[in-house]
Image (cartoon, grey):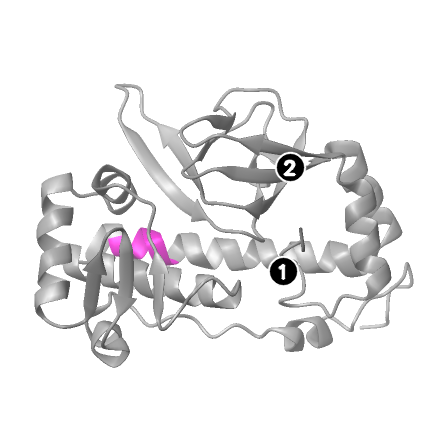
Amino acid sequence: MQPPYHRLEEFVPLTGSDEDLVRRFAASNRKIHRGHAIRREGDHVGGIFFLMEGWVASSMMLRDGRRQIVKVHLPGDMLGMPSLSLSRAGETLEALTEVVVSVIPCPALGRMFTENPRLAVGLFLSTQKERVALMQSLSWIGAASALERLAAFLLDLHSRLNAAGLTRADGFDLPLTQQHLADLLGITPVHVNRTLKRLDQAGYVQRSRGRIVIADLAGLRAVAANAPPRFADHDAWTRLGSPSGNHIPDP
């Protein structure tokens, strides 16, 4: 299995030794069946998870049992990073498909930071990208219509899946139920169905047996809640002085 390292090298150019280090500190691979939890809210935090294959939902529960999905994770994502700052896991990580994760225990993650500042910077910048994504999703839920929310989410999925090499002919498999989409976008499943039909009838997307094809990319962008952000990529690494050791450059 070729590890999906595209997320790790979005901001920092990885070397072969960097990849070897990640493999060394990844304790083991775990297979998780669809619908099962990788880790539940309130569980002990023993490490993080590198998503090798499959789709995972990160969610939080309200006191009355309602669920809010805050992120749909794709191959290459690091799972469980926010809970490193908590005494117990703050989110539930649920497999939306058959999933393979690589487990990185907390002590190994700490040694990785110490031994390889390049990877530490890469992970730091990647978490900032996740923060931008969360800011965007909050803006969708707080101010956008259902049509704008769903269009923005489909564009985000298309972009991320394309980066992972998981799109074909401008389309991708969508293994999410209407309930999943409702829990993510803050609308009802019925409203999800109606909104998908509107996007289909307008010619922006085509749906067929769990697959979505972006038929009119420009049109979908025009109705989306906001434009996708432009990330600095490797310029962010250069901006920080390309740190590669323990020496701290002069300001």
Q: Amino acid at mark 2?
A: Ile
Give the number of marks.
2
Dot 1: element: helix
Q: Quadrant of residue 171?
A: bottom left
| Nearer the camera: disc 1 or disc 2 | 2
Residue extent of the magenta highlight: 136-140
Decide whether residue 244 is among the magenta residues: no
- Drawn side of residue 128 relative to residue 106, left or right: left
Residue 245 seen in this snapshot: yes
Residue depicted at 25% across the width and 50% down the height: 141
Q: Residue furthest bottom?
A: 218
Q: In the image, is 107 to the left or to the right of 221? A: right
Q: Which residue is mark 2?
A: 48
User: How much space separates mark 1 and mark 2, taking CA atoms?
Assistant: 16 Å
**Residue 189 vertical placement versus 36 (above, below):** below
Q: Which residue is mark 1?
A: 125
Secondary-structure class at tag 2: strand
Q: Earlier in the sequence, mark 1 or mark 2?
A: 2
